[in-house]
Image: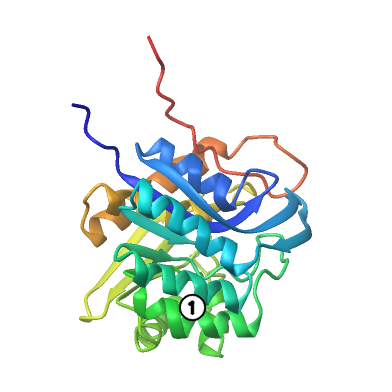
Amino acid sequence: MTALPPRTLTIAGSDSGGGAGIQADLKTFAALGCYGMSAITAITAQNTLGVTGVHAIPAQMVAAQIDAVATDIGIDAAKTGMLGTAAIVEAVAAAADRHGLRKLVVDPVMVATSGATLSDDATAQAMVRLLFPRALLVTPNLPEASYLLGRPVTRRADMERAAQQLIELGCQAVLLKGGHLAEAGAQDSLDDLLMSADGSVRVFSHPRIDTRNLHGTGCTLAAAIASQLARGDALEQAVGTALDFVAKAIAAGADLRLGAGNGPLNHGFAPRVLG
């Protein structure tokens, strides 16, 4: 009998341009050997230049999608991306309890790479109140951390303090992504800080790749972490493997000429060839 593949669910918005959202998540799940499923929270009209339209899905339909796959196929790990409304956050939190989703990665998506706003205050507050305590890991970038903490977080020296303050909001663990660091030296090295509620800290460093093709990086990272958790990795191992995957996908997509703006990563940099 063939063993079941790891089963991963993305609860996020749809990106018509294919670079971020559920499209990036499903590509990542497949690349890492998982069976991917989706609960769509919003339909967006977007491309590499930006977002031109957003249509939120009713919260009860989001819950119905989660229920449908959880009760039939099963879920080993899940990640959230763009949630759009406080009502959707509430529906996702209730579904996480209903189906015992313990390996939940929350990417607190608030602003697209193009600068378009994808969340409002009520939604962000609902995420903190309802999803952070239910998440195994929360993965904010520096602008998102700044928004959540109500103060700028822009320097390496402040990342550990900011991560601790995010833990105090109820997270079990935080991966604070350093891609937006602008201080001297940050142009060469990319540092991401993982902190757990027990106080343990691990910094992951990668060379920074000079490319504008970074659309969907955060979505891809959260999806890759969920994939590795579904495969049975411990959290620190899952984060390390996922960061390596993203770095390789960025490098492989650095010279892609897809669109006139912020292009996507190359999720399929190591395709499986049949025959």
Residue 171 in view:
yes
Asked whether 235 or 59 is in front, the reply is: 59
Picture quadrant where residue 5 is located: top left
Instruction: Relative to 223, say whether 191 is above or below.
Output: below
Q: What residue type is labelled 1?
A: Arg
Residue situated furthest right in the rendering: 52
At 58% from the left edge and 53% from the top edge, which residue is drawn? 21
Question: On the rendered structure, is 64 left or right of 206?
Answer: right
Asked whether 213 or 270 is in front, the reply is: 270
Q: Position of residue 191 (x, y in %)?
A: 41, 64
Q: Position of residue 17 (x, y in %)?
A: 69, 44
At 47% from the left edge and 54% from the top edge, which residue is drawn? 10
Tell me the quarter of the image containing the N terminus.
Answer: top left
Q: Where is residue 260 in the image (x, y as percent from the top left)?
A: 78, 43
Residue 188 in view:
no
Asked whether 274 or 158 is in front, the reply is: 274
At 79% from the left edge and 59% from the top edge, which residue is drawn? 53
- According to the picture, the residue beneath numbered tag 1 turns out to be 155
Asked whether 11 or 159 is in front, the reply is: 11
Tell me the quarter of the image containing the C terminus.
Answer: top left
Q: How crowded is mark 1: few (under 14 residues within 10 Å), some or many (20 or more)?
A: some
